[in-house]
Amino acid sequence: MSTSSAAILGCAGTVLSAEEAAFFRDVKPWGFILFKRNIETPDQVRKLTSALRETIGRPDAPILIDQEGGRVARLGPPHWGKYPPGRAYGELVANDPLVAREITRLGARLIAHDLTSLGINVDCVPVLDVPDPKGHEIIGDRAYGDTPQQVATLGRAAAEGLLAGGVLPIIKHIPGHGRAMADSHLELPVVKVKLAELDERDFAPFRVLSDMPMAMTAHVVYTAIDRRRPATTSKKAIKQIIRGSLGFDGLLMSDDLSMKALSGDFKQRAKDSLSAGCDVVLHCNGDMDEMKAVMAGVGKMSKEARRRAQAVMGRLVKVPEPLDVVEARGRFDAAFDGRYAG
């Protein structure tokens, strides 16, 4: 890990090209991320995760995926089960208030089972954003509820289910994307709300889950913190809010550098994110030219980043919590009246 570069990278297809393998051997990213374009069959994914790790010589290297459920799911039928969006868990109203929490944890535990069988050991879950009714739909039903308490409660349940199954969770999008009036994939959102209000509502779930191993930043400007820079590239947002008042000391990664919310070339985006205080940067689309530009702005992981990365990998359980998959899936499907079965 001491020789790892401060980056997480994607690849273009379902198998590694010779150029990709040589590039990864050379730059040694800390980890990798998979998308739908990388997914065909269980055997194919297992071969791909193995090949990725082989390029950097680390059999436990982090391999990430966005498997939230609902519209953000890279795995699905016929090879893998369907899962609901976060909002569906929050709408599980029953006489027992613990039901929603139990089923959220169970869903995450089942997802962890799917992922570990493929060699994937990190899931970009839970979404801890508290949606604003006026906000952009990019968060929408991905949120577990409309209150900080509900989001924090179910977010922790999801994180616990993943951890129990041998998968690391990532809390996102710190310090909160819920008020954004724009999709940061396409443009830079600017949130003009007083700090006290942000602290009470938007930041609250992240404070509650500040003990989690990893977090992903929001490409959002909060004018109360930094009028010019989004959290990803803002020293003020990272030092004062994320590391300071929220108390997060886990591994901090940028959201995808290829999103249009960020400005400058890819080398500059990477440098700005790392100099602001991110431990690693994320580049997702597998475009070789872009990855080369990113890596021109990325050095080896800092001493603090290495310390955090080592602590992160120490959170991976060696023996997952026992799971009767058939029974658990049956109970899970029954909770949603079969809407996500099949």
Image (cartoon, rainbow, N blue to C red):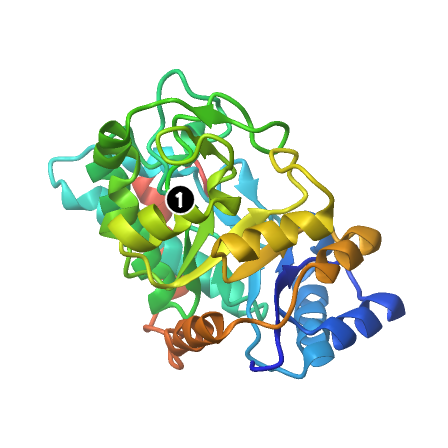
Residue linked to disc 1 = 237
Q: Is residue 224 above or below residue 52?
A: above
| Residue occupying the point 28% across, 61% down | 211
In the image: residue 214, left or right of residue 90: right
| Residue occupying the point 39% across, 15% down | 134
The mark tally for this picture is 1
In the image: residue 177, left or right of residue 331: right
Q: Residue furthest right?
A: 18
Give residue 278's position: percent from left, percent from top: 49, 57
Query: Which sits in the foreground, 62 or 203?
Result: 203
Q: Residue furthest top?
A: 134
| Residue occupying the point 70% across, 80% down | 54
Q: Amino acid at mark 1?
A: Ala
At numbered mark 1, what does the secondary structure look like: helix, strand or loop? helix
Give residue 311's position: percent from left, percent from top: 39, 75
In the image: residue 195, left or right of residue 182: left
Query: Which sits in the foreground, 57 or 279?
Result: 279
| Residue occupying the point 53% across, 45% down | 233
Query: Which sits in the foreground, 198 or 131?
Result: 198
Give residue 247's position: percent from left, percent from top: 27, 56
Quarter of the figure with the N terminus: bottom right
In the image: residue 278, left or right of residue 186: left
Q: Is residue 259 above or below residue 51?
A: above
Q: Residue furthest left?
A: 95
Give residue 277's position: percent from left, percent from top: 47, 56
Q: State the image quarter where residue 164 is shown.
A: bottom left
Category of crowding for the residue at label 1, using alpha-carbon neighbours closer than 10 angstroms: few (below 14), some (14–19), many (at least 20) = many
